[in-house]
Amino acid sequence: MAEENATQTTDRLGESIQSQISITFMDNVRIEAGEYLVHVTIPGDNAAAYSAIQLLKSDLEFANECLVEADKLGIPDESNLNSKALIFAGIVAYARAFVTSVRGVRILPSELIENGVAFDLTIHSYLMDLRNKHVAHSVNAFEECNTTGVLVGFPEKPTRPNGIGFVMKSSVGISRQQLIKALGHISTLVAHLETESKVRRIALFDEFKALHAAGNRMELAPIPTLNDRANVGNRR
């Protein structure tokens, strides 16, 4: 009984972590019965960029899922916990794809526009400002609070202080019209990253074959491990 209770407590206090292995076979040569598959790490900047693109796409897909679910609830609503939480989560995930990080690759709007990718700069700028000035930091006037004092008295007679209060306004900061535009914009970006991923995968496979033919030693691909929460503030 004690062991059962201990297991239940651990389950309730832990965390579910997602791990994923994705393989796109590039060689048309038949894999025979008995042959084994070995996952190895490909070194180099191109391989690192390919990995980064997968994370960028994951961020945008998550942002899209959050905003889709938020839209099902109707107009963005500050008083609706799910509406606000989904939109804020979606905005933060969207911005992750454009800011500098250890990934080494981020989406550059100017580069996409130069290459003819349909990029809604207006909605992008709004989402980034919303993240930077409201969601992540309290800077703009989308939330305000003013302290008030209460005076009590009869008309035309002296008043007396009677209380302290405040007047507060808060909002999610985005209209449903803007949210719908954001969904279309994000879907376009996800499609672009999918195309970019395919192009890079072909080039990377040629590089992989060249490295293998040259006899370069390759390390086994790492096995996903649990997070060490003591490193929460450290760079990976």
Image: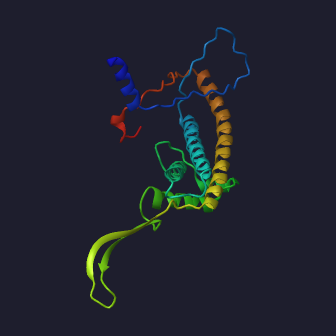
Which residue of the protein is positioned furthest toward the top in this rendering? 34
Coloring scheme of the render?
rainbow
x, y percent for residue 8: 39, 25
Residue at horizontal 53%, vertical 30%? 43
Q: Please state the horizontal and vertical placement of residue 218, each as a whole percent of the image.
A: 52, 22
Q: How many marks?
A: 0
User: Residue 56 placed where, x, y %?
Assistant: 56, 43
Outermost bottom residue: 156
Q: Who's the residue at 35% across and 22% down the image?
A: 5
Residue 42 lies in quadrant? top right
Q: Is residue 200 left or right of residue 219?
A: right
| Horizontal side of residue 188 vs 106, given as left or right | right
Quadrant (top left/top right/bottom left/bottom right) for the C terminus: top left
Q: Nearer the viewer, residue 12 or 31?
A: 12
Q: Is residue 100 left or right of residue 215?
A: left
Q: Which of the image's four quarters has the N terminus?
A: top left
Q: Nearer the viewer, residue 26 or 21?
A: 21
Q: Residue at x 34, y 88 (%)?
A: 155
The correct choice, above or below, for 233 with respect to 178 in the image is above
User: Closer to the camera, 35 or 127?
Assistant: 127
Residue 147: x, y in percent? 33, 71
Which quarter of the figure has residue 228?
A: top left
Left or right for 54, reference 114: left
The answer to whether 110 is drawn above or below residue 3 in the figure is below
Front in this rendered view, residue 20 or 160 = 160
